[in-house]
Amino acid sequence: MNQNVILNLRFVSIFFAIVLNGILSKDANAQSAFMMKYLPKDPTLLEKIEVPKGISRCVMLEDKIWNDKIKTDTVSINTYDSLGRDDETVFFSEGKRESHYFCEYPNANTKKFYTIMKVDSKLSVRNYDENVIDAAGNFIDASSYQVTNAGDTIMVNDHDYVYDDSRRLIYQCDQCNLSMHIKRYFRYKGNTLIRLYETSLDTLQTFYISDMVYDQDGRMTRYTYRNIFKGDTNLNQDCLYTYENGRLVRQLQFNYFEKVWREYVYLYDSLGRVSQSYQIIETDTITIAYYFEGDRLMSSFLTTTFQYSEGYVFFGNKFRESFDGKDHTTETRYTYDKDGHRTAIEQYWDGVLRRRYRNLFE
C-alpha cells in the first residue's frame, strides 16, 4: 500500500479525533461531555425510539411543508439482525447519502462498528470502532483502527480503563496512542463519584475539574465545572438542583458564555408525569405544556416571544432586538401504533404544520 495514502488516512482520523476532543470533551454547553451521563436527567426528554421486536428495518422520513407543498427526504435507514441488534445504518441529508455504518458482534461482549471509505478504484478502507465490555457492562477495552483491503492495519485511537478492587472506574485514557491524549482520574466517596480530573498533553498546567455534591438520598444537588490554566481558575459551569417528592423540580445553571443564571422549572401531575416546564433567562421565558393519554405523551405546546429559524427558537435578551417580540408557538403531536411504538412526530409553528417525521417499520 502506498505509504502516503496510509499517512493521509491516519492524519484525517487524527484530525477528527482532535476536533471532536476540542468540541465535545471540554465545552459542550460549558460542561464536560463525559459528565453528561452522570448529571440529573432532564425529565422532559423523550426516550429513544423503541424499535418493535422482530422487525428487520426502520426507515425515518422527514416531510417539510411550506405553502402547501411537501418535500420528503429520507433521514435514515436502520436494519437489524435476527437478535434485534443494530446491523446497518445509513444517514441521509437533503436526499443524499451522508454516512453508512455497519456492526459486527464477534462474541457476546464485543461490538465492532465500522464504515467503509473508498480511496480510489483499487483501495478501500474500513474504519473500525471496537468496544469490549465485561459481565457488568463496564468497558474494559475500546479502540478505533483502520483496515485496508490490502491488509494494512493502522491504529487511530486506543482507550485504556482501570478499575479498583471495588470495580469502580478510577482511570481512563482516550487517544492513548496519540500525543494529544485525554486522561481522566475519578475520585469517589463510597461508590459515589464526587470529583473528575481531565487533562491532555501530559501536563498539569491545563486541566479540568468536575465536582459533584449530593444530598442524603444520593441525589446530585450541585455540579461545578472549572478549568485551571497555569494556576488560574475559571468557572465554566455551575448547576444547582432542587427536588421535591423524589423528583427534580428546579435547576439553576450558570454558563460562562452567558454571564447570567438560566433557570429550569418542572411541574408534575398526580401520576408523576411532567405537566409543564419553564426555561427562564432574566425576563425571558419559554413555557411548555405536556399532554398525555395513559402513559403516552400525545402533544406538547411551547410558547415563546422569539421567532423561529428552521424550527429553532432563539432565546435570551441578546436576541430581543433581532425579532418582533410577538408570542410564537410550537405544538408537537405524537402518533403511536397499536403496540405503543412512536410512528410520527408533527410540528406546528404558529398553528401551521411545518414538519413531520415518520418511522416506517418493516
Image (tube, rainbow, N blue to C red):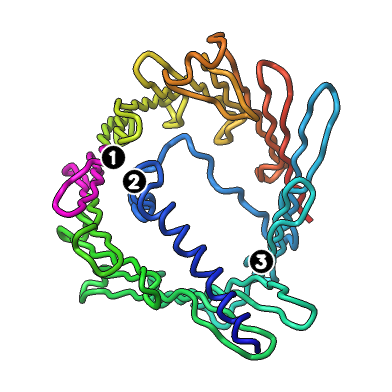
Crowding near the residue tagged with mark 3, few <14, some 14–19, many ≥20 C-alpha atoms within 10 Å: some
Residue 31, numbered circle: 2
Is residue 329 or residue 215 the one in the foreground? 329
**Mark found first going from the N terminus, 1 or 3:** 3
Amino acid identity at mark 3 = Tyr
Rendered location of residue 362, percent (x, y): 79, 56
Give the x, y percent position of residue 243: 27, 33
Magenta-drawn segment: 211-238
- Residue 113 percent location from the top left of the image: 59, 71
Give the answer, above or below, for where 255 lies relative to 176.
Answer: above
The image position of residue 353, as x and y in percent, is 74, 24
| Marked residue nearer the N-terminal end (2 or 3) | 2
**What's the mark number on residue 274?**
none
| Residue tagged 1 | 237
User: For residue 116, what is the image quadrant?
Assistant: bottom right
1 or 3: mark nearer the eye: 1
